[in-house]
Image (cartoon, grey):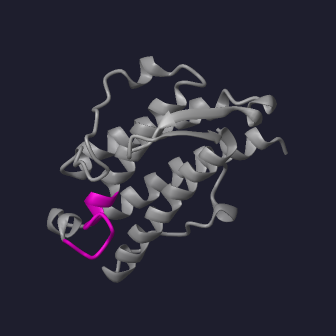
């Protein structure tokens, strides 16, 4: 399997898991979503917002390789990693779905020789960084999985069934 197909699969898995866990979170009361529960970004909603923020950062950086600025033009510009872009799931979900769809379209543009691309960007500390594209993509999807693991741990603590999250058992990831 070409390396680019792996990231196309990860983008689709990412979307499927985000939808599944948002569905599970939608069974909670607003107070439970905002309740401080010891997650790194404080609450379930804080964690979901952090994922939105980091995805906006990364998609803007990735647009240097494949121009997608038009799709990003009207997105908010978060100031920090814990910026609250959405105060409830009703406003968070459409933004999450939009970012997931942009990742899918972006990964669909990947070609075999793009594996050698290097992305140069300024990190959150103001430092210029150059990293290989495949490592950046691996980081992006691993970061999502890491925080979704925190979300599933909290959902488990609250007694919410969020279903199976294993990549191997995720339904069709081809579209």
Indicate whether 31 appears above or below 103.
below
* Residue 151 part of the magenta segment: no
Q: Is residue 34 left or right of residue 128?
A: left
Start and end of the magenta stretch?
Answer: 36-47
Residue 26 in sight in this render: no
Q: Residue at x 28, y 46 (%)?
A: 80
Q: Quadrant of residue 154?
A: bottom left
Which of the two residues, 160 or 145, is positioned nearer the viewer here? 145
Mark count: 0
Image spot of residue 95 (x, y percent): 34, 39
Task: Work out whether 10 lies above or below 97.
Answer: below
In the picture, the quarter occupied by the N terminus is top right
In the drawing, does residue 40 fall left or right of residue 144?
left
Q: Position of residue 108 (x, y in %)?
A: 66, 31
Residue pictured at 60% horizontal, 34% vertical = 119
Image point (28%, 33%), residue name: 77
Q: For residue 82, say whether it is visible.
A: yes
Pick whichever, 57 or 34, lies toward us.
57
Q: Quadrant of residue 57?
A: top left
Q: Quadrant of residue 91?
A: top left
In the foreground, 158 or 5: 5
Residue 40 magenta-highlighted = yes
**The furthest residue to the left:** 31
Q: Is residue 2 left or right of residue 52?
A: right
Q: What residue is drawn where x is 50% and y is 34%? A: 121
């Amino acid at each position: 399997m070409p390396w680019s197909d792996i990231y196309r699969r990860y983008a689709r898995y990412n979307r499927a898991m985000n939808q599944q866990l948002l569905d599970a979170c939608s069974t909670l009361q607003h107070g439970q979503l905002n309740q401080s529960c010891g997650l790194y970004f404080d609450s379930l909603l804080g964690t979901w917002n952090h994922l939105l923020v980091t995805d906006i950062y990364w998609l803007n950086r990735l647009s240097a390789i494949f121009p997608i600025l038009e799709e990003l033009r009207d997105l908010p510009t978060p100031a920090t990693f814990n910026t609250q872009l959405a105060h409830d799931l009703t406003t968070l979900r459409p933004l999450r779905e939009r970012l997931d769809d942009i990742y899918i379209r972006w990964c669909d543009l990947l070609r075999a020789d793009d594996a050698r691309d290097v992305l140069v960007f300024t990190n959150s500390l103001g430092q210029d960084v150059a990293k290989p594209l495949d490592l950046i993509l691996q980081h992006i999807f691993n970061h999502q999985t890491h925080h979704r693991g925190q979300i599933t741990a909290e959902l488990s603590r609250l007694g919410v069934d969020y279903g199976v999250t294993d990549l191997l058992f995720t339904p069709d990831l081809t579209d």
